[in-house]
Amino acid sequence: MDPATEDLLRALAPQVLGAVVRRYGHFDTAEDAVQEALIAAATRWPDNGVPDNPRAWLVTVASRRLTDLLRGEQARRRREDTVAAQWVPPADVSTVDSDDTLILLFLCCHPALSPASQIALTLRAVGGLTTAEVARAFLVPEATMTRRITRAKQRIKESGLPFSLPPADQRASRQSAVLHVLYLIFNEGYASTAGQNLHRVELSTEAIRLTRVVHRLLPDDPEVAGLLALMLLTDARRPARTGTGGELVPMAEQDRRLWTVESIEEGVALLSGVLPRGEPGPYQIQAAIAAVHDEAPSADETDWPQIVALYELLMRLSDNPMVALNHAVAVAMLRGAGAGLTLVDALAADERVAADHRLPAVRAHLLEMSGDRAAAREAYLAAAARTVSRPQQRYLHARAARLG
């Protein structure tokens, strides 16, 4: 299957799932039906061509497969009657153009689910990540994540919640999980945890699109605007993050002329509109850090005192080891490699990050800054052994090779 068709199916998958769930319910069975429709498309479209209305084709095939699956359940007659009463002929399905992705997003953030299950299910159903990718995002084994997602789908099935946007008085309670989900989807797209490519543009683009939708829904919420600003300011650097051969280019070595000016301007404008409103939340602070980087004319002219102060503010709001790791880098840039290494070494005892490749990668960078080439080389190789991302592996091996 060619990459364009694969990208199309990935983009359509949550829309098709939303359409099928809205019409027929049965979230868990509907996802199975949609997956079979996607497999059918991947098998048939290369030979027969992409249909004029690929979304309607997928909805029709998934709807038919759903009725087949429901017939096999023990409550066959009762469920068949329900499906028959709700059935919309394929000709009518093809005329439906509404995008139910946002409704699906809030459904996955059902209040009956734990926050971790909300995020995992949405990454799987809306973000299109595989269970293995979701597991890596949570730093848990794939089998554990499989059980978590299965339980989450069962809870939604048992709840009988209608497929519609939650009432206005309930949206705020689900907002935190929704924003976290979008944040993780964007991160997986911007820096893929596995595979041949550093980016999965379809994921970061979809995360930005969905965040724009949430921003339209909640225009006065500063954290929604902060998250959208963070995504735009970060994604603006994507054109310069890889070289001609797909190799990773660290920010300090990037050609800033390649950064997307329009995204930076939009992100800064969003941030400027919400920061004066009061105490900023985590997404606004992260966006402010990204803005400081983006507005610096060069790496040497980065305002590191401001970045250190922003990370320290963020650490007071969020007990996140990755925030602490980024803070250590900023401290090293401001006060020297030794100060940063002290903070990095302290993080080695944190089991949430101890096995992550980013810990030895940062340590290697700071050791190289300090002049300890041998120790830096060992740390780069240790980091390369921990990641399954090929671009990250190539970058880390190349760094180690430079040091002999």
Image (spheres, helix red, strand yellow):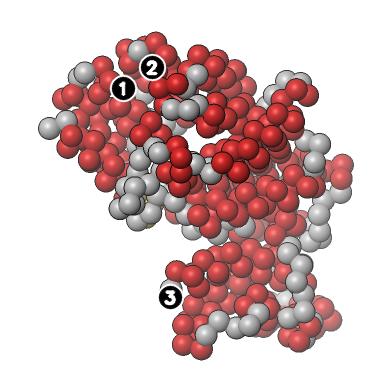
Q: Nearer the viewer, residue 15 or 239?
A: 239
Name the residue located 77 percent from the left edge and 75 percent from the top edge. 96
Separation (CA) of disc 3 from disc 2: 46 Å
Q: Nearer the viewer, residue 167 or 98?
A: 98
Asked if the residue at tag 1 contacts the one at tag 2, i.e. Cβ–Cβ closer than 8 Å, the answer is yes
Mark 2, Cα crowd under 10 Å, few <14 / some 14-19 / many 20+, is many
Which circle's residue, 2 or 1, is located before the other in the chain?
2
Task: Tell me if residue 58 comes above or below residue 115 in the rendering.
Answer: below
Q: Secondary structure at mark 2?
A: helix
Based on the displayed image, in which of its 4 quarters is residue 343 positioned? top left
Q: Amino acid at mark 1?
A: Leu
Residue 332: assigned label: 2
Asked if the residue at tag 1 contacts the one at tag 3, i.e. Cβ–Cβ closer than 8 Å, the answer is no
Task: Tell me if residue 113 comes above or below residue 311 in the rendering.
Answer: below
Q: Position of residue 197 (x, y in %)?
A: 38, 54
Task: Tell me if residue 235 comes above or below residue 322 in the rendering.
Answer: below
Question: In the image, 333: left or right of 81?
Answer: left
Q: Nearer the viewer, residue 54 or 27?
A: 54
Q: Which quadrant is the N terminus positioned in?
A: bottom left
For label 3, the residue is 1
Q: Secondary structure at mark 1?
A: helix
Mark 3, Cα crowd under 10 Å, few <14 / some 14-19 / many 20+, is few
Residue 267: assigned label: none
Task: Tell me if residue 76 comes above or below residue 119 in the rendering.
Answer: below
Q: Nearer the viewer, residue 168 or 340?
A: 340
Name the residue located 73 percent from the left edge and 76 percent from the top edge. 75
Q: Secondary structure at mark 3?
A: loop
Separation (CA) of disc 3 from disc 1: 43 Å
Residue 366: assigned label: 1
Q: Position of residue 342 (x, y in %)?
A: 35, 14
Q: Amino acid at mark 2?
A: Ala
